[in-house]
Image (cartoon, rainbow, N blue to C red):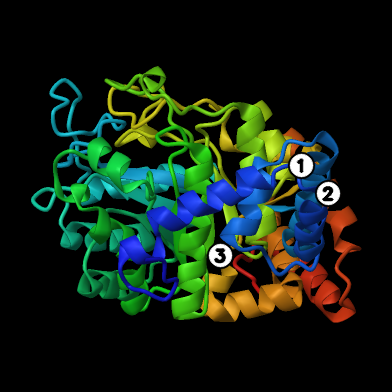
Amino acid sequence: MYNVNSMKAEEFISHEEVLESLKYADENRDNVKLIDEILAKAKERKGLNHREASVLLACDIPEKVNEMYSLAEQIKKDFYGNRIVMFAPLYLSNYCVNGCVYCPYHLKNKHIPRRKLTQEEVAREVTALQDMGHKRLAIESGEDPVNNPIEYILECIDTIYNTKHKNGAIRRVNVNIAATTVDNYRKLKEAGIGTYILFQETYHKKSYEALHPTGPKHDYAYHTEAMDRAMEGGIDDVGLGVLFGLELYRYEYCALLMHAEHLEAVFGVGPHTISVPRIKHADDIDPSAFDNAISDEIFCKIAALIRIAVPYTGMIISTRESEAVREQIIRLGVSQISGGSRTSVGGYCENERPHDTEQFDVSDQRTLDEVVNWLMRIGYIPSFCTACYREGRTGDRFMTLLKSGQISNCCYPNALMTLKEYLMDYATQDTRSIGEALIEKELDNISNENVRNICRDNLCKIQDGLRDFRF
């Protein structure tokens, strides 16, 4: 029985409710009057429920789809402007006891080299990432209570935050590790993490159990209820995501929104981010073995409709996707992207990109500088800002500022100041020239005169060698 307030996975992600919603969407996919009513509601910038959003996803009337894309683009501009937050993944260990059939780290894969970073190696990886210009990391690890216990993760977080090189510093560590206990989430919160990220992979319980035949991840309810435990443990910024291609995309989209609605109903704040990865080739993994792969066109439509349905939530796209796809999907709603990523354990210290321990093939293999240069050339401000997390603007405090529009008084100048840091410390000459001109132009778009003047003054101080200013 569907109950958005329930703490039981099969009730707040009700299989029957998903199927009824998809049936309703099929019945109304050509209902122009209803579609117009849903779009009118979406234009109020307060979001849509899973059933309304499913109707839009089912609709393939060209002019209505174009209207959805235009609305998604406008909502993105309204809440996130032309800022794109930069981050990189850091893989700590590929030891894993699970049997996930889509991941090369699965236990039965005996030919992939297994590796776990020592604290000295973590520090070297962090130094390499700092020397690229990164300020925000997402740490990744396989699930293995012997090799990767929570104590190891906490030690790695401490090492990351305490590793400094030249002007480099990692100011925010997001964590993507397996579902765990309330007590362990409390420990992660105390360690100063930013967002706790956990991909559901698929919300379809029968498929989930088949795709995770062995290991602790086989427990659908424990995994699906992880965000509830994380929030109970004090982590108020959580990130959802599904791995598109494992199950029918319309099912996943509907259930993903139901999960967001559940968090909003129970905790008063929805997901801080939603990620939209697609299954990719990797060692021992052939994506063509999965029957539900989605086209670039559908992928972009999903992103646009996530932006419309949950307008305040950050959206993440990784280097799984090509430059062409990333350029298209950023416009439709994405607010965070990775750059210069390596998905192998210890990959950043290697001159050549290692492939033997990669979790998935990286499609966009450009350097961080090349990505920053590209973003600026197509009209975006690459942002290395971590201020909200460090100023305590998380959870409902962040969402309140975002919904009111006041967050732009922080995010916009912070983006320009952190970009200035990057240009001074790490950029090539061409990137620096483009960036300096961009900053000068964008300064005039800060509407608050006092904020604009402070930002301009801080930019001069950054030019003179000072660092880490924030609103």
Q: Position of residue 407 (x, y in %)?
A: 71, 73
Most foreground residue, 224 or 381: 224
Q: Which residue is denoted by mark 1 in the rendering?
A: 376
**Which residue is pictured at 43% across the width and 27% down the height?**
280
Q: Are marks 1 and 2 in contact (CB under 8 Å)?
A: yes
Q: CA distance from mark 1 to mark 2?
A: 7 Å
Q: Which residue is denoted by mark 2 in the rendering?
A: 438
Query: Along the horizontal axis of the image, is 459 left or right of 312?
Result: right
Q: Residues within 10 Å of mark 1 (few under 14, many from 20)?
A: some
Q: Amino acid at mark 3?
A: Thr
Q: Amino acid at mark 1?
A: Met
Circle 2 SS class: helix
Q: Which residue is denoted by mark 3 in the rendering?
A: 386
The mark closer to the camera, 2 or 3, is: 3
**Which residue is pictured at 30% across the width and 71% down the height?**
229
Most foreground residue, 200 or 153: 200
Q: Position of residue 383 (x, y in %)?
A: 66, 54
Circle 3 SS class: loop
Q: Amino acid at mark 2?
A: Leu
Q: Position of residue 384 (x, y in %)?
A: 60, 56
